[in-house]
């Protein structure tokens, strides 16, 4: 079974406190008595050894020497061969007589000069004492010392101390348990928080961060490492997400290009199929000299279809050149106002069946390739003329729009369906595929060519459905010729 760190710390602390208290109790019960008795014996021996060095028969002087020992419940009797010299001030006279061991036959050998304290019983009564009977010389005369202290007081003190220690131990054990619980919880709290952050990181939720301002060096270092790992993982995930988005965009673009390529091949095949079939049919009729054949009509039709194929082939070559980055494009500063006016003048022959109106603002200059821009302008105008009924209105405009030259061509006619607005710029796309071929003499490449040219010049393009027609436009960045 798994146990938490907090529980382990609490159990360990409680066990340590309990072991300490048990050791203290065992010492108090079994070892403190003998230890205190030996300590008292040592005190008595030191007192006896110190008496000869500074001795005087003056009771007050002796009291000053033995005052500390007497305060520690040690009784002292000093006598000579002539009688009592000194007795502890807490000993009553009758007790002195009881304790004078020389009453009766006096054994001088019982008071050796090298006496040591011993545990003994008094002759009168059963009281056990620590007793020292010793002799020392003072001015050539013997002085006899009886130093004793009751063992019962030591044992009573041991019992009282053991009982007090037991109560204190219980209080300390209770406080130890409470402190261990509080400490273990406070110590394990940052560990739990770091664990939650690690779980979030494992689940790729990298926004959570661990607290790095911890009092424990190891936990603080662990928090720093966890946060560094989360930040690196977050950067890696963001980078991976960005790469995935780019990859998905590339895949979508590739799928779109594949679709357009398939449509392009299908459209080219379709556009070439009809003229080739007509050429084959009319050529065979001419070869076979069919009597009913109108040779002039057949020849005109063949010439017309060949022209269509020639136009289509040139458009395809233009597209190939444009899609290869407008290879060989030579940019120069163009007065776009004069440029558009010149294109309109050269196309004047096309406007016989429509009403042409123009509004060209002067003094607008752009940077571009004149050959390709002329093709873009012509394609817009030709597209407008081809979709305008006889005596319909075509309006060509050029004006400043902020920092751009805004060129537009409006033609009266039917508006473009909303679902076709975004697709008219695709190659070979026609808004009305049900039209008869003789009503539409273009392959649907003009607007696609305009889009490619304007993109190459850093411009924008679009169309606007009006109430009575359609406006196609593009914008090119203006340049300040005065600054040059």
Image: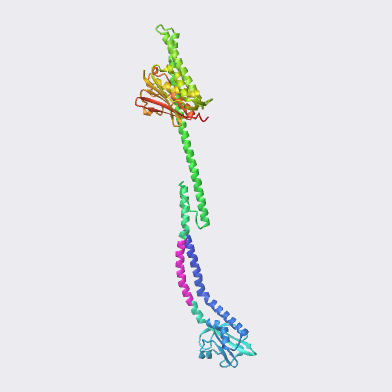
- Compared across the picture, whether 185 is left or right of 465 comes to right
Q: Compared with residue 424, is residue 438 higher up or lower down, i.e. above or below?
A: above
Residue 244 is inside the magenta segment: no
Q: Residue 27, how many percent across, how many down? A: 52, 73
Q: Residue 309, how many percent across, how many down? A: 46, 17
Q: Looking at the picture, tell me which residue is in the foreground, 124 or 412.
A: 412
Residue beneath the point at 49% across and 79% down: 156
Residue beneath the point at 48% across and 42% down: 238
Q: What stretch is highlighted in magenta?
A: 159-183
Any part of residue 146 in sight: no
Residue 165 is inside the magenta segment: yes
Residue ranking furthest to the left: 467
- Compared across the picture, whether 389 is left or right of 92 comes to left
Q: Compared with residue 462, is residue 145 higher up or lower down, i.e. above or below?
A: below
Q: Residue 374, how many percent across, how many down? A: 47, 22
Any part of residue 171 in sight: yes
Q: Compared with residue 54, is residue 172 higher up or lower down, i.e. above or below?
A: above
Q: Compared with residue 90, is residue 366 higher up or lower down, i.e. above or below?
A: above
């Amino acid at each position: 079974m798994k146990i938490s760190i907090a529980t382990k710390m609490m159990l360990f602390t409680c066990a340590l406190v309990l072991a300490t208290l048990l050791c203290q109790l065992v010492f108090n019960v079994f070892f403190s008595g003998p230890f205190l008795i030996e300590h008292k014996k040592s005190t008595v021996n030191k007192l006896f050894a110190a008496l000869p060095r500074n001795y005087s028969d003056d009771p007050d002087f002796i009291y000053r020497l033995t005052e500390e020992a007497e305060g520690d419940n040690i009784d002292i009797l000093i006598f000579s061969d002539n009688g009592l010299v000194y007795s502890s001030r807490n000993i009553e006279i009758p007790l002195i007589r009881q304790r004078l061991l020389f009453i009766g036959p006096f054994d001088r050998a019982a008071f050796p000069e090298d006496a040591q304290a011993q545990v003994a019983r008094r002759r009168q009564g059963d009281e056990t004492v620590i007793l020292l009977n010793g002799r020392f010389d003072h001015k050539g005369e013997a002085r006899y010392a009886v130093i004793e202290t009751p063992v019962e007081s030591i044992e009573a003190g041991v019992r009282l101390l053991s009982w007090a220690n037991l109560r204190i131990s219980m209080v300390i054990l209770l406080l130890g348990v409470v402190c261990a619980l509080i400490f273990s919880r406070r110590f394990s709290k940052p560990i739990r928080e770091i664990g939650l952050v690690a779980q979030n990181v494992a689940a790729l939720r990298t926004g959570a961060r661990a607290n790095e301002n911890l009092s424990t060096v190891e936990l603080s270092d662990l928090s720093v490492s966890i946060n560094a790992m989360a930040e690196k993982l977050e950067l890696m995930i963001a980078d991976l997400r960005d790469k995935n988005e780019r990859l998905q965009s590339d895949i979508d673009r590739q799928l779109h290009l594949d679709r357009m390529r398939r449509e392009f091949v299908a459209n080219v095949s379709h556009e070439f199929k009809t003229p080739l079939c007509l050429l084959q049919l009319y050529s065979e009729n001419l070869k076979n000299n069919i009597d009913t054949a109108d040779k002039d009509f057949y020849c005109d039709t063949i010439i017309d279809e060949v022209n269509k194929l020639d136009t289509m082939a040139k458009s395809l070559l233009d597209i190939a050149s444009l899609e290869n980055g407008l290879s060989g494009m030579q940019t120069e500063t163009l007065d776009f106002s004069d440029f558009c006016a010149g294109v309109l003048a050269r196309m004047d022959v096309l406007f016989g069946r429509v009403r042409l109106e123009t509004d060209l603002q002067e003094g607008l200059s752009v940077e571009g390739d004149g050959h390709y821009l002329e093709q873009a302008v012509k394609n817009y105008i030709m597209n407008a003329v081809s979709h305008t009924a006889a005596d319909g209105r075509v309006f060509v405009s050029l004006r400043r729009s902020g920092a751009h030259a805004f060129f537009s061509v409006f033609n009266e006619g039917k508006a473009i369906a909303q679902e076709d607005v975004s697709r008219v710029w695709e190659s070979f796309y026609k808004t009305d595929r049900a039209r008869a071929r003789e009503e539409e003499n273009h392959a649907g490449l003009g607007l696609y060519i305009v889009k490619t040219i304007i993109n190459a010049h850093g411009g924008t393009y679009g169309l606007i459905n009006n109430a009575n027609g359609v406006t196609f436009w593009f914008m090119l960045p203006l340049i300040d010729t005065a600054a040059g």
